[in-house]
Amino acid sequence: MTARAPRPARRNVVVLFIDLVGSTELAERLDPELLRHILDRYYQACTSGIGEHGGVVEKFIGDAIMAVFGIPISSEDDALRAVRAAHTALARVRELSDGLAPTHGIRLEVHCGVSAGEAVVIDTPGSDLRVIGDTVNTAARLQSAAGAGEILVGDEVGRMVRAQARLVSMPPLTLKGKSNPVRAWRVESLEPQTGGRDEGAVPLVGRDDEMDQLRQAYRRSSRGRRCCVVTLLGTPGIGKSRLVRDFVHTLPEEVTVLVGRCRSYGAGITYRPVAEMLEALNGSWTDIAPLMEPSSTPALRGLVTADASRSPRGGEEAGVEEISRAVRTLFEALARHRPLVVVWEDLHWAEPTLLDLIDDVATWLLDVAVLLVCVARPELLDARPTWGGGMACSSSLELGALDQDQMRLLVAALSAGRAPEPEVVAHGVDALCVRVADGSDGNPLFAELMLETLVEDGEDAPLPPTIQALLGARLDRLGEGEREVLERAAAIGHVFTADQLGLLCRDGLDEQDMGESLRRLLRHRMIRRREASGSFQFTQTLTRDTVYAMTRKELRASWHLALADRLTGAGRPHPGGSYEESSHSDLTHHLEAACHLTRDVRPDDPSLPALTERAARALIDEGTQALHRNDLPAAVGLLERGRDLLPAGDPEHRPLAVRICDAGVARGDGDRAFAALDTAERMLPDDRRTRLTCAIQRETLAVRFGTRPVDHGALREMLAADPGDDLGWCRFHQLEALARTIEGRSGAAEDVLREGLVRARSLGDRYEEDRLLSGLCELAQWSPTPLRESLALCDELSARFGGDRALLVPVLLTKARLLALSGEVTAARAVLATAGRHAGDLHLDMAATAVNQVRGLVESLVGRHAEAETLFRRCASALRRAGHTSPGRTLEAYAARELLRQGLVSEAGEALDRLEAEAGRPQVRGELVVLAARARIASLGGDHGAALAFAARAREALDRTDDPCLRGDVLTELARAYSAAGHAAEAGEAAERALHSYLAKGAGLPAGRVRAWIAEQEGPR
């Protein structure tokens, strides 16, 4: 691999500032030479603690010391190391102060600040270390805010250390240079918190097979009196330690269990796990000293005392071979009395000497029941690729991710165990559990940390810092080539191919290096192969996100742009001019990312305006496609992101406002729709056409949401002054059609939509044209256009929209109702079933409501009035929730009519009473249905005068609609009311007019019902 010069790196670091309190006063009191001597001792006291805990001193600033943890390699416990280093510095400065006070009459005090976050690190061999970023400033400000002898830590550090330290929450701090108050914590002491959640209260989920294998290994060891080794591998947080803990709790009481944990840093770490085991025996191991070799006792005692005194050699004075023999004889002596289980935690941190010791123990122990459980991450196999291979009774288990069902069960248990429970409920426990289960990559620890963060900080909370630290530490231990491949893969996405990597690796890795790096990443379980040849994916989404965030933005921008350029060159345009959907989505993502990243790090880049234009157009194109297929959330998001990239004055702001407004209305989000119009006027303040189009859209919103009466003469006059404004006229004709539909004049609405269609075709806007055609098709079921012509239009549009199910759904709904009116009920239900599947597959909520509405109409036509009433009520509730109050009231009138048709007269009357008690202007359709139902109810109750009065009002209002089926429905109800009131002539006349209306439309099914009723009234001839 070709060597490359070190480069700036984007990293997650922990920064510690330590400063001397009252240094100005000291300088005033002391001789400069004495002061220098004291400061040297002060610096030594602080820096020694920093070094012991793995920190690096970045600089001295006067009396202040800035240290960084996480360089050159980060660890998941960097925050804890920094806090421990600060605590050590405080203690050692106090010791120094106690020694100076009697002789010099002075006291020294320091205060500390610790902050964690992203920074750019420049660490060139032979040069000074440089750390740049807000994390440095925040740590310095926290140190300034701390009192004498205090350690203040930022919120992220607090979250990462609160399980190992006692913290006191501070009021939000107003720090110099920070725009918002900063949440901080004061470190009281370095002790584990108490009173937390009992992990044992949450059941172990999804590990039955692995538990059985551990138990089987124990049975082999105890029954066969042999030393067996089980190596338990898994990524951080996957549940290795929890599984072992639960396994140990199931062992018989007579079993001796020893646990030792390997540490990643510090003095005496080689044999520290053995020392922990000896400490756990509370000195009782010396009771079996006679059973051990004579040299064993001094060697083991040396391990304990060496650790206690922080000897840098960690007890190695006894010699490696002697210590190994002593541990072996200790285990053998313990196992002579009863079975022994030895757990080696975090064995991936183990020094080679300790690994040799375990190998030696496993090889030489005979005739004793000893089970060695080695718990490690897959990195252990990097240090020892053949680990366990030469051991006689050895097995290896690897814990994989939990599946979705297991994760949801686990998260539900975690959520139930949290306190106080109302806090969880307030955030929507079910939705929260699903989000955490789906987003934690099957990792139990990640799920617990994510749940904790989301409950405390809300749904917009970032990734918990503890997860970032865990993943960052793993990434830092990768080889340079592996890290470079992983960074480029993260820029491509969760799924990537070798060809895409090859494109991005041309500036560094050759093909052989890339292939070897991929193989190592597979062994590390960072990635896995997919079925397609040469295709891979990240094992954990969170790993990909962390790698991406820790890669320099400048590099990410260049890679995204390279991928976008490749897609632009390789895409295959459709006849309509767009790329394949997946390729277009990838292109949009890479262009947008390249644009934003370049803006962040090179805002003066001369290529940025052209890149911004490309990204904006790609977003708008994809957003328009989403709007075509009625994917409204995606449409709004994409269109708004594209709009936000466009500069003020770009004419695209006008059509964008219209489309975002359409999506907002369809979602029932009036605020979003109005905001889109406001933005367009702000971006194009002097454009008359934009102002007029926005005025038309605001009027449309007012009419649609039922807040303004219909009167658009002033808008027409303004448009007349600009006959060439095709978009303005197109939108005005849609407004007119909406108003006329509400008035019940469907035929007139058809006429103005056809005028709008001419404008849309002149404009060359496929979106506007499809929208108008869909409107014409929907009106075809209500307008006077004969049924056969309407069905022909449905067939024509079915062919046009055949590849777009979202546009196809409204066409299918119209076709279903027309088929039912013609008497083809079975065919109508089949078409409705197809429309319902499409709406469900595409998650089109409003379309699903429309499907149920037409189902209700069909059920009513065939006399299933109870089913129709249920469907109408369900649809009315959905429309009201979406803000469409007037259409919702109309459907409630339909539901009341269905109650009447079931013979539930009083219930129908009560429903109408509730409806009429509401304020607001009803639609003509709903008004006519209510009047006809009132006339019928009055006649059935014997109040014929009221019945005739309602009938007269209904006949007068009937002239306001040209909908033949609505006219037929109302006249049929009036005929029945007249008949019950004894007005046979009026009844016959109303029935004949109803029949004529149905026949004019071609609605054979209701026409047949009217004929039968007329014949029944005439009686046998």
Image: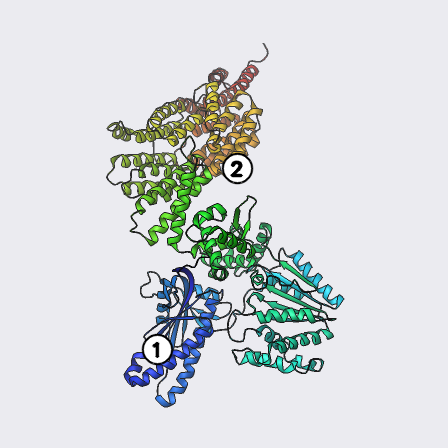
Q: Earlier in the sequence, mark 2 or mark 1?
A: 1
Residue 840, label in figure = 2
Callout 1, which amino acid? Val
Question: Residue 104 appears at what percent x and percent y?
Answer: 35, 88
The answer to whether any part of residue 427 appears in the image is: no
Label 1: which residue? 21
In the figure, 293 relative to 144: above or below? below
Q: Secondary structure at mark 1?
A: loop
x 34%, y 38%: residue: 656
Label 1 neighbourhood size at 10 Å, few (<14), some (14-19), many (20+)? some
Q: Could you say where residue 1016 lies in the image, as x and y percent from the top left?
A: 57, 16
* C-alpha distance separating marks 2 and 1: 67 Å
* Residue with the most extreme bottom position: 103
For the residue pair 976 and 691, the one nearer the viewer reads as 691
| Nearer to the camera, 402 or 884 | 402
Q: Is residue 85 above or below residue 855?
A: below
Query: Is disc 2 surrounded by few (<14), some (14 to 19) or many (20+) residues within 10 Å?
Result: few
Name the side, left or right, on which 294 lies relative to 557: right
Q: Is residue 530 above or below residue 1015?
A: below
Q: Nearer the viewer, residue 931 or 826?
A: 826
